[in-house]
Each structure stands twice: as structure tokens, then as C-alpha cells.
Image (cartoon, rainbow, N blue to C red):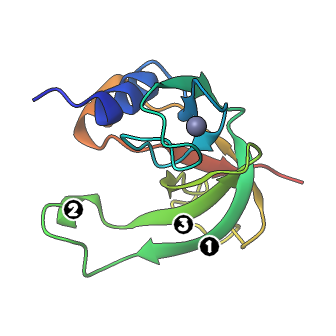
Amino acid sequence: MSNPIRDGFRAGLAQGELLVQKCNDCGGLNMYPRHACPHCQSLSLGWQKASGRGILHSYTVLRQGAPQGFEGDLPYALGVVKLQEGVQLLGRLIPDPDGNWDSYKCDDTVEFTPVSAESIERRPCASFKRINP
Ligand SMILES: [Zn+2]
């Protein structure tokens, strides 16, 4: 079923872009996307390509106890990323080369990292990796 909020975000991810919703009336950014602008209640909403850079506000590594349907993804890491644009979202964290996330710390700078379209089809979420300082 078509869903303008979900589909726009996912289409961006599938093309390797991180999009944030932008209000066509007040210019405010919304993340997560909404049906109406939370700043001015406008229904005229579009998309803006995000810088992709942000700060890792918080994260967790799941090694067991995944939600139903996600058991096969274990282990994986989820992080709350505050983008430079000021909005934040939940995304997956790309593991270190050894398959763990030991190098990650809260307040690290992270960068949106495109993944394959097949991966987005399966798990339509943004992925981020830590940027070495
Ligand atoms: Zn607005």
C-alpha cells in the first residue's frame, strides 16, 4: 500500500541518500516524517537531502533478545543519531572490521553510509559508521 511518508524516505535510502522531511511553507525539518508539519501544521511537505553527518547520541548492541523477525540479524547495533541539521533518527551502526562495535562511543561523529538496495528492501533503515577523529 502506498504511503507518502514511508515511501519517500525509503526511496531515498534505496538510491543511497538520506532524506529528511522539509516543510514547504515554514522550511522546518521533521524527523521522523509526519503527515503535518509540527512547526506550522502545513500539509505541504517535501524532502531535503541530509548532510549525512551527525553525532551518536546513544546506541545499543543487540546480541540476543531481538524482536520477532529480527533474530537472523543478530548481532546488530542501533543508534540515535542527531544530524547536523538538528533532527535525529534511529539507525543501524556499521560494525568495526572485526564485526564488533567496540570503537563506538556516545558523542562520536558518525556518517550516513549507503547500503545495497537489497539490504534497504529487507531492512529500510539508515546505516551510519563512526568517523575517525
Ligand atoms: Zn511548517
Helix, strand or loop at disc 3? loop
- Which mark, by number, is residue 90? none
Task: Report the mark closest to the observer, 2 or 1.
Answer: 1
In the image, residue 62 lies at what x, y percent? 39, 74
Q: Residue at x 33, y 40 (%)?
A: 124
Mark closer to the chain start, 1 or 3: 1
Task: Determine crowd level at label 1: few under 14, some 14-19, many 20+ residues with C-alpha closer than 10 A.
Answer: some
Q: Which residue is mark 3?
A: 100
Q: Residue at x 36, y 30 (%)?
A: 10
Cα gap from disc 2 to disc 3, whole angstroms: 18 Å
> Quick check: marks 1 and 3 in contact, CB under 8 Å?
no
Task: Report the mark closest to the observer, 2 or 3.
Answer: 2
* Front residue of 6 and 41: 41
Q: Which residue is mark 1?
A: 58
- The amino acid sitting under disc 1 is Ser
Cα gap from disc 2 to disc 1, whole angstroms: 20 Å
Helix, strand or loop at disc 1? strand
- The amino acid sitting under disc 2 is Phe
Apparent side of residue 64 relative to residue 67 in the rendered image (left or right): right
**Quadrant housing the N terminus:** top left
- Which quadrant of the structure image shows residue 59? bottom right
Q: Above or below — where is 5 with respect to 30?
A: above
Mark closer to the chain start, 2 or 3: 2
Give the residue furthest to the top.
Answer: 15
